[in-house]
Image (tube, rainbow, N blue to C red):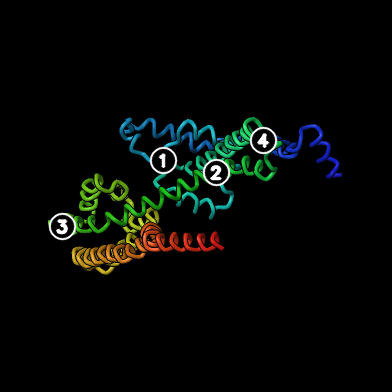
Amino acid sequence: MFDNLIAAIQDQLGPVGPLIAMGVLGVSLIVLTLALMPTQRRDPLDRLREEAESKKPGNTAQGQSMRRETTSRHSKKLEKYAAFLEPTDEKEMSDARLKMIQAGYYSKTAVRDLAAMQFILSVVMLLAGLAVAFLVVDPDQESPIKMAATVLGPTLLGYYGPRMWVENRRSARQEEIILGFPDSLDMLLICVEAGQSLDQAIQRVGKEIHRGYPALGEELETVSYEIRAGKDRAEVLRDMGRRCGVRDIDSFVTVMIQSATFGTSIGDALRVFADDMRDKRVMRAEEKANVLPTKLTLGTMMFTVPPLLIILIGPSVVGISDVLGGGLGGG
């Protein structure tokens, strides 16, 4: 029965008829799923919270622009598709949100926006692949495998492209934090030894280092704002370690919490830890310098050895071919 169905589709639509039918069926199922998706009711507490915040006298436009967790108009349109776009498991949702935060996307709807972007791009690229496959490429001259690759390749790129973008942004942000952290420790030590408290030093260093390392400066300013808002310092530092996802930041948080718990000098702890971070930065530089000859070896073998062999062996090969050719001709 299945073979008869495929044969009937091929008779109607040609050799690539099953591929066309699969594409149309997939798009139809996607549209049907979105149409039947139940609308998520808005939480009344969220509405009351927004009304209370709008009535506050200090809630100016500048203050609102500094808030990270703002919901745009496009995000509000996606609320009714939240059950379809966001993970249902609490742990998966927490991990996905943490990855988005580590990549620099602090919005409450960042996970939902990423899923929506993946969905939209995959559908658009699917339609583009179908258009290329049936309007540009000749189905009679191309094999079904190439036609399927023409359709599925852009679709997979549209689906995994945003996720790869987030991963690359996350890695770049963590690398920036790692590079700027030793300098920030030196500045913290200077501020603390000058008589400032740790909270004042974090606020000052966050402003000063923001130009060179924006990600690290943003994290330090966030810590300063949360401490000034009355949040416990240990909890704020732990949150910073989770947001950064860098092992050096986790070690710094542990040192600061232990120093505050046991009553030791914060200046001494910062001095020792800053020395360790400077040594660690030198070790990273030495590691990259030691890896460089190995990387250059491959380039040397690819671009130097073949021309050298041609120069040294080429004349001999030409001479041997001439001798053998002449000998054969004379025989």
Examine the rendering and report whether any part of residue 200 can be seen.
yes
Indicate left or right for 233 with 1 as reference: left
Q: Residue drawn at (54%, 39%), measured in percent from left and top?
A: 116
The residue wearing badge 1 is 69
Q: Which secondary structure lies at badge 1? A: loop
**In which quadrant of the rendered image does the C terminus lie?**
bottom right
Residue 107 at x, y percent in the picture: 43, 42
Name the image quarter holding residue 292: bottom left
Report the disc number at residue 157. Answer: 2
- Of the image marks 2 and 3, the number of the one nearer the N terminus: 2
Which residue is the extreme one toward the left? 194
- Of the image marks 4 and 3, the number of the one nearer the N terminus: 4
Q: Residue drawn at (66%, 41%), measured in percent from left and top?
A: 147
Indicate left or right for 58 with 136 as reference: left
Q: Which secondary structure lies at badge 2? A: helix
The residue wearing badge 3 is 190
Q: In this view, does 75 lie above or below 330?
A: above
Q: What's the CA distance linking mark 4 and mark 1? A: 33 Å
Q: How crowded is mark 4: few (under 14 residues within 10 Å), some or many (20 or more)?
A: some
Q: Which of 271 and 140 is in front in this view?
A: 140
The residue wearing badge 4 is 27
Q: What's the CA distance linking mark 2 and mark 4? A: 17 Å
Q: What's the CA distance linking mark 4 and mark 3? A: 61 Å
Residue 96 at x, y percent in the picture: 50, 50
The mark lying in front, picked from 2 and 3, is 2
Q: What residue type is labelled 3?
A: Ile
Q: What residue type is labelled 4?
A: Val
Q: Are marks 1 and 2 in contact (CB under 8 Å)?
A: no
**In which quadrant of the rendered image does the N terminus lie?**
top right
Q: Is residue 287 above or below residue 176?
A: below
Residue 52 at x, y percent in the picture: 41, 34
